[in-house]
Amino acid sequence: MLYYELGDVVTLKKGHPCGENKWEISRTGADIKLKCLGCEREIWMTRMEFEKRVRKIKEGEKFVSIIHHHKEEKE
Ligand SMILES: [Zn+2]
């Protein structure tokens, strides 16, 4: 089980065609909505697809591997 929530910034296995690879989670649920922080375009993907593609998540000023990210550490 991966921990992420609305407003978290993540990187994916593959970046957006605009060259950016930072995405803000703008909707969670069965489908996840991500906003590209380079060009502000939004994309949808299923939760399963998202969990397969997500690589890192922003914690404070740095990005850490999603598998080392736990909700408890944020609080
Ligand atoms: Zn983009």
Image (tube, rainbow, N blue to C red):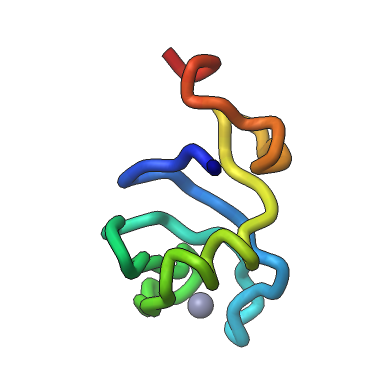
Q: Which picture quadrant has residue 12?
A: bottom right
Does residue 53 appear left or right of residue 23 in this picture?
A: right
Q: Residue farthest to the front?
A: 1
| Nearer-the-camera pick, 2 or 33 | 2
Which residue appears at 30% of the width and 56% of the height?
A: 28
Which residue appears at 42% of the width and 56% of the height?
A: 24
Q: Position of residue 39 (x, y in %)?
A: 44, 76
Does residue 63 appear left or right of residue 51 in this picture?
A: right
Q: Which picture quadrant has residue 18?
A: bottom right
* Number of callouts: 0
Q: Position of residue 14 (x, y in %)?
A: 70, 74
Q: Which picture quadrant has residue 73?
A: top right
Q: Position of residue 58 (x, y in %)?
A: 57, 39
| Nearer-the-camera pick, 28 or 20 | 28
Q: Position of residue 61 (x, y in %)?
A: 60, 30
Q: For the N terminus, which image quadrant?
A: top right
Which residue appears at 43% of the width and 65% of the height?
A: 47
Above or below residue 2? Residue 43 is below
Q: Residue farthest to the bottom?
A: 17
Which residue appears at 42% of the width and 13% of the height?
A: 75
Above or below residue 57? Residue 72 is above
Above or below residue 49? Residue 51 is above
